[in-house]
Image: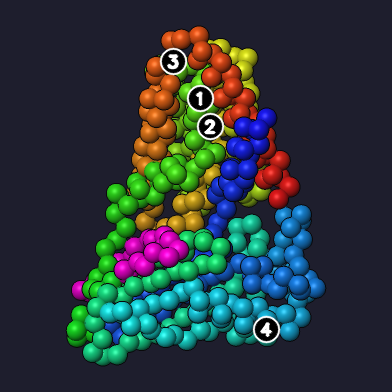
Amino acid sequence: MKLVSLIFSLCSAVLLAHDVNQVKSEMKIADAGWQAQVEIECWALYPEDGAHLPDENDQDNFAGADWMKQLTQAELTKMKQTAETYLKDCFQLTLGGEKLSYEIEFLDFAVPDPVWKLTENGQAVYRMALRGTWAADASGALQLQWSDYSDEPLSLQLHTPDANGVDQIRVMRVLVGTPEVLTQVSAAGKVEQAKKTSLVEWIVHGFQHIIPKGLDHILFILGLFLLQPKIRPLLAQSTAFTIAHSITLGMVVAGWFTVPSSIVEPAIALSIAYVGLENMWVKELKPWRVLLIFALGLLHGMGFASVMKDLEIPAGSIFTPLLGFNIGVECGQLAVLLGAFLVTGAILQRPIFARVRWVGSLLIGLMGLYWTIERIVG
């Protein structure tokens, strides 16, 4: 039981593995300077001692448009001040090592009764415009230092013009505390064109979503491995899972339909619990299990899609991101299976593996149940 408790405590940070980041930005850089639009969920700016704290137990109405309407002018002003302080602390640009200043405009306060932008989960979003310039003789690397208080990365879509003035778009995740070079500015003040996000970079994004960020998906893949660690059973299950998650990943990213994460995330956790617990009484692969894995793959594809949408895919250009992300996910899953074979290879044919299989499946099942409950209630 101590081992189970330890695993639960270590994994509690993965309760909502595909939640959209609180902060997104679209940034355009030109020879004269730069501008960016930053979006942050409103509830993150509300004072902790405020009279209208959003109800975390009411996910259908949590911090939505109705909640924003009940806030007083004093509360809204306080939130604006918090947002300004937050940006000044967290969104820092330097050119050639010199810090750049910028102006902030709160777009949603341009009208008396703003219509708030909402996330796909119905949460209201603050939109802020940032604008800045640099001296005509300035040159060097234009760097962004992101210092979010809760260590969340920034989802950034970067636009730089090519020789013909056409935007080239790069999708980035700027990690906390790691300065990111956005572009180079020449001595004449000219901006060097940034490269588009390549297929390889999308493959890396997909791989990273499994290793190290996708603990829930890792446990699901290990659950498939533990049922029958042989090539044919694993190939049948992984093929069904891959085809299924590719279908829903593409459909959701293309905008054909969407399912709230409040439904998808508990369902994914429940699928992990089922695969783990079923292994405890099923000893070999059955045909119906392949069909079940296909159905569960449809669920996991919706989870992958929320991550891709968080990465701000450029409009009208989804083929390369989808292909790269899918390849990266498959590479991550294959790496998990390879690691499982390497770790257990010496005992696969020994009686002790049956005990390892039973204990491992039990822990995966319990972890899935734990995540299911946590994702439903919180």
The numbered disc on residue 196 is none
Q: Please identify the quadrant where the N terminus is shown.
A: top right
Q: State the residue position of label 1.
A: 224
Q: State the residue position of label 4.
A: 77
Q: Nearer the viewer, residue 177 or 271?
A: 177
For residue 372, say whether it is visible. Answer: yes
Outermost right residue: 51
Give the magenta-colored segment's residue range.
162-182
Q: Nearer the viewer, residue 248 or 173?
A: 173
| Distance (Cα) linking label 2 and label 4 | 46 Å
Q: Is residue 11 above or below residue 137?
A: above
Q: State the residue position of label 2.
A: 220
Q: Please check the rendered image and state whether residue 165 is part of the magenta-colored stretch, yes or no.
A: yes
Q: Is residue 233 above or below residue 335?
A: above
Question: Mark 1 or mark 3: which comes first in sequence?
Answer: 1
| Distance (Cα) linking label 1 and label 4 | 52 Å
